[in-house]
Image: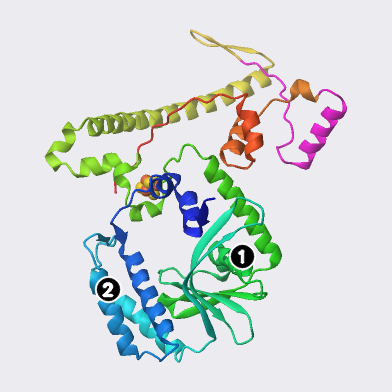
Amino acid sequence: MPEYSNSQLGKFENCPLQYRLIYVDRIKRPEEGVEAFLGQRFHEAMEWLYRERAFRIIPLEELLGFYEAQWKAAWHAEVKITKKERRPDDYRLLGRRFIEDYYRRHQPFAEGRVLGLERYIQFPLAEGTRYACKGVIDRLMLAPDGAFEIHDYKTGAGLPVQAELDKDRQLALYQIGVQKLWPEAREVRLVWHLAAFDMEMRSARTAEALEGLKGEIMGLIDRIEAEREFGPRESALCDWCSYWDLCPAKKHLVKVEALPADRWKDEPGVAIVDAYGELYKKKREMKAELDVVEKELDEVEEAAIKFAEREGISVIAGTEQNLRVTGKEHMSAPAKGSKERAELEGELRALGVWDEVATLDTAALEKAMTEGRWGGEIVGRIKAYVSTEKRYTVKLKENG
Ligand code: SF4
């Protein structure tokens, strides 16, 4: 029975291709973003701090020394810094500041009893089902009032708003696991330590919210297991992806970038894009001219209709051609989704003529099927009737 972690689920949502490369093909890459590297070092320092806390309070200088040593030992050539103006030391010093701030705010680190550090958990989402999840809790605590607390360190630069944390899946998923594994954990609090802001934020979940979340995760697991295409989904996160050479959306960029600049023009793909760009520009200029002509034509048409109405005629004579002006009543139905539309549809059904005027909305059908709104059984039955064909679109995008 496969177990899914929150980051695994998130990877699929962000980019199915990246998910496949990591979790199905199991292709490992040495690159990591400097932000993740810093986060890892911060987590190590916190783990050591609380592990040692059972015996002593580590002085801040010693903790910083540990952090520096870990940073030095773990640093490698494949740590990627995407912000061009930044240097590794900027991040190292940032991590030091996070630790200093955290230390000053939380010493003497006696907010409760430590139940687990970097604690790995695995658990079924719902008894008797095949859905199972796993995760690593940064720090599991027993608060003085008997509540369990799930603590998580975040070193990212974005400050979440409370509403985001109230919907955060990661810690809520851990709560499901904690309450499965330790049924005495009747009250659970979710705690985020936002190191970049020297802030702590909290949230809690109701039993209903957790039930809803289980349903959502099971639906997502169904989608992952039914997925066949695992297509790329480009987003801002691509900047942190180390699979560009395997991604159809990026691999030609990698290939061309590796060529000397004077060889770019000879590359067949580059030649196609440049030709396309030229023609597209020409088309846009011609279209602008066409738009002007169409606007003028509309104005003349309007004048012709007014003239024909005023004169009570349907054909207007010109020098070399005639202009026929025909008027015809057209019916318009109430807008889709409106109350009136629903009433009209009800009327047509009641009159027994609905089948004569209703047509299948294939665009809506495709959307529902591809968005995973329906379960596997419904999709399977419909698939028996529909066929698929690959249609391409071609769109220019500026480099950079
Ligand atoms: S580069 Fe972007 S689209 Fe391609 S695999 Fe990575 S995340 Fe997905």
As drawn, the label of residue 279 is none
Residue beneath the point at 19% across and 33% down? 267
The colour scheme used to paint the residues is rainbow
As drawn, the label of residue 176 is 1
Label 1: which secondary element: helix
Q: Is residue 21 left or right of residue 274?
A: right
Report which residue position mark 2 lands on.
Answer: 71
Residue 359 position by quadrant: top right
Asked if marks 1 and 2 touch (Cβ < 8 Å), the reply is no
Q: Earlier in the sequence, mark 1 or mark 2?
A: 2
Q: Nearer the viewer, residue 388 or 235?
A: 388
For the residue with label 1, is its CB less than 8 Å from the closest atom of ligand 1? Answer: no
Q: In this rendering, does residue 117 appear at all?
A: yes
Residue beneath the point at 29% across and 41% down? 251
Residue 276: percent from the left, percent from the top? Answer: 30, 30
Residue 245: percent from the left, percent from the top? Answer: 29, 44
User: Tag 2: Cα neighbours inside 10 Å, few (<14), some, or many (≥20)?
Assistant: some
- Does residue 20 show up magenta in the picture? no
Residue beneath the point at 60% across and 36% down? 369
Highlighted magenta segment, given as a residue range: 325-353
